[in-house]
Image (cartoon, rainbow, N blue to C red):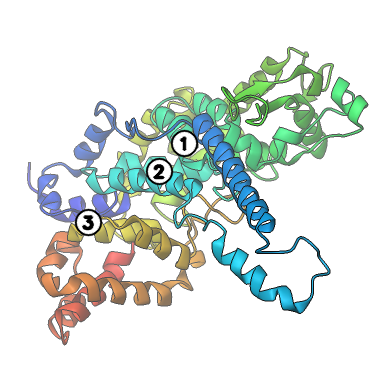
Amino acid sequence: MPLDPKGAALGLHRFGLGPRPASIMAIASDPRGALLAELDRTNVGQIVNADLPTSGAANRAVFEFLAERSAAQKREKKRLEAQGAVTANPAASKDDAPKRDAMATALPKIETLPLPRQIFLNEARARVDAATKAEIGFVERLVWFWSNHFCVNADATVMAGGYEREAIRPHVLGRFVDMLLAAEGHPAMLVYLDNAQSIGPNSVAGINRDKGLNENFAREILELHTLGVRTVYTQEDVTSFAKVLTGWTLLQAVSDPDHGGEFVFIKRLHEPGPQTVIGKTYPDTGVEQGRTVLRDLAAHPATATHVATQLARHFVADDPPPSLVERLTQRFLDTDGDLREVARALVTASDAWVPERTKIKRPSEWAVAALRATGVEIDIRRIMQAQLLLGEPLWRPAAPKGFSDDTAAWLDGLAQRLAIANAFAQREGASVDAQDLAETALGPLLTDHTRRVLQGAESRQQALALLLMAPEFQRR
């Protein structure tokens, strides 16, 4: 079989996370076969790290941490007040200002890296480490895609990293319905989309507490996670589905130190009686009522089309070829939502290998591609800061629809990428030959124009920055 280095380079950028040294030629004999082989690798896409806590354990640990910190600060304040270092009288004169300043100085300082931040950075480091070490990164890209599809927000919950490991990674090459059930039943999702406080109006708790329904969770499942916006459902379906999902919540760490932060179905919060969703009536079977609706949504043809369109848009083009969407849709339906088979259909479709590279990498993909090409050691705080500056802070999307996969959404951030590329090059560029690196990172995708630009650079640092900003490196 003749070598296909151009196809290998294209595959690594479009479907993977960018080439590492020698990786273009390593798969040049059969680029598609290499992508398919990664799908069959044992434990691919999983993060096995005993030091990372479960979501529930993280939730409980942070609750205890915040409670202990608050108590310690209050104890110290009382001690200082008792010693006369500060007055508790709110009408104290300005003469007491030095005492108040003394107390502020003496109070225990908040840790430079408090526990919630530690948990976040440890999860982020494990994620980036998995991405940089992957041979190709196709499955990691799939993890990132699905984590964004079923997004949560780290500002709302400390469980975001655990959620990805527990709800997304185990099912990334499994059945869509299993990922759907895992994602929607995860405490991080229930917190993010406000279902933890949703109460059936006619439930025992709803009547006693005079509280009611929150439709956010049901609406986002229908619009974003399954059927797609403005498809086969109505507002009445949203309301009925929201009632079905009442009672899906999580145990509170304040009252359950052993299982706080874990999923629980509470019957007294659940709207009693049957509910009709998209023309089908579901009897009240408690938590199974919601799971049955989710199973039916997973099998709906509109879901297959929505998922197929999103995948094709993410990997191939903002306006993906209709034939590719149709191929992925049909494979989804034929295999009962087998995501490994849908991924196989994607990389074996000729439409997915068009040579035009029109999509700009998202900031996280661009940053990891730079790390993979250069082999620079991970500095997770710098990476997280870069993603924040570039508009893609990890696990912190601005809305439940996740970060955009449209190229236009990232064009305005190219100036910030240049600043970050320059900073990266100043730190690492002295030891990097950008022209050699261009062969590693781009190989046959490197244009004559970019090669001349690199040759004309005034320094190694400038050459590295120019390479990272080259159109060939920016695009999938």
- In the image shown, does 275 or 156 lie closer to the viewer? 156
Residue 213 in the image, given as x and y percentages of width and height: 82, 35
Q: Residues within 10 Å of mark 1 (few under 14, many from 20)?
A: many
Secondary structure of residue under mark 2: helix
Q: Position of residue 21 (x, y in %)?
A: 12, 54
Left or right: 127 with respect to 319? left
Q: Kindly identify which residue carries mark 1.
A: 162
Amino acid type, mark 3: Glu
* Image quadrant containing the C terminus: bottom left
**What is the three-letter code of the residue carrying label 2?**
Glu
Q: Residues within 10 Å of mark 2 (few under 14, many from 20)?
A: many
Residue appearing at x 33%, y 34% in the figure = 47
Specify few, some or many for label 3: CA neighbours under 10 Å numbering under 14, 14-19, or 20 or more. few
Q: Earlier in the sequence, mark 2 or mark 1?
A: 2
Q: Which image quarter holds the N terminus?
A: top left
Query: Residue 123 got which mark?
Result: 2
Above or below: residue 157 compared with residue 372: above
| Coordinates of residue 174 in the picture (x, y in percent) | 41, 25
* Residue in the picture at 84% in, 16% down: 273
- Give the residue at mark 3: 377
Marks 2 and 3 sit apart, C-alpha to C-alpha, by 17 Å
